[in-house]
Amino acid sequence: MSDHDQGAPRGRRPRSGGAEKLRLERREGSAWELVHPRCSRRRREDLEEVDEMIAAGETEIARDELVWLLSECPDFLEAHVRLGMIALEEDDPKLARGHFGRAYELVLRTLDAAGNPQPLPHALDGNKPFFEAAKGLVHCLLETGRGTMAQDACRRIAPLDPADPLGIQRLLRR
């Protein structure tokens, strides 16, 4: 292994080329779906390993793996969401807010760049990590006394999927 490879867990090779970005594609009817960067789609097995680590109680190793995955693929929404979940499990809503917030912001930037198309239904697989991040963010904002910011986030995401299958809007009414 070269010196350049030493930062990569499990002997993986560092990425080559520039960072890939999240984007949107129109689906059937008027629905839009997030298309995740190729780098995140290629890391599906790594994410499964992280889930196994978390299930086995190896959260420190899982966290290191997720950080490495994000160094390879900064727009990897599911890695941001997993880090947020780990922080919540460790009773650190402020840190979790940062992780969920990063995934949320990445999607908002993508939506803004595309002219804010709607709807973005949770039912489409590519959109699920965004809504998980949004729910985690709203929860953390409420837990850290930032109710106005939570309301703003809810207002921003409500028109994207009015059905609200994750009950994000209901979090404001607790």
Image (cartoon, rainbow, N blue to C red):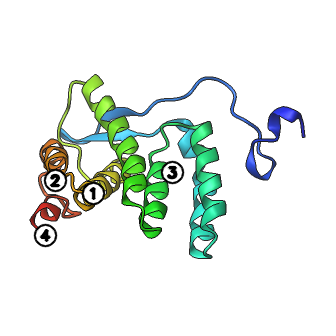
Q: Amino acid at mark 1?
A: Thr
149 left or right of 33 in image = left
Task: State how far apart marks 1 and 2 are (Cα).
Answer: 8 Å
Residue underneath mark 1: 144
Residue underneath mark 2: 147
In primary-sequence order, the first of circles 2 and 3 is 3
Looking at the image, do the residues carrying marks 1 and 2 touch, with CB atoms under 8 Å apart? Answer: no
- Locate residue 174: give its quadrant: bottom left
Q: Residues within 10 Å of mark 4 (few under 14, many from 20)?
A: few
Q: Viewer-proximal residue, 101 or 74?
A: 101
Q: Residues within 10 Å of mark 1 (few under 14, many from 20)?
A: few
Q: Amino acid at mark 2?
A: Gly
Q: Secondary structure at mark 3?
A: helix
Residue at the (60%, 23%) spot, across then down: 18
Residue underneath mark 4: 174
Is residue 137 something that shows in the picture? Answer: yes
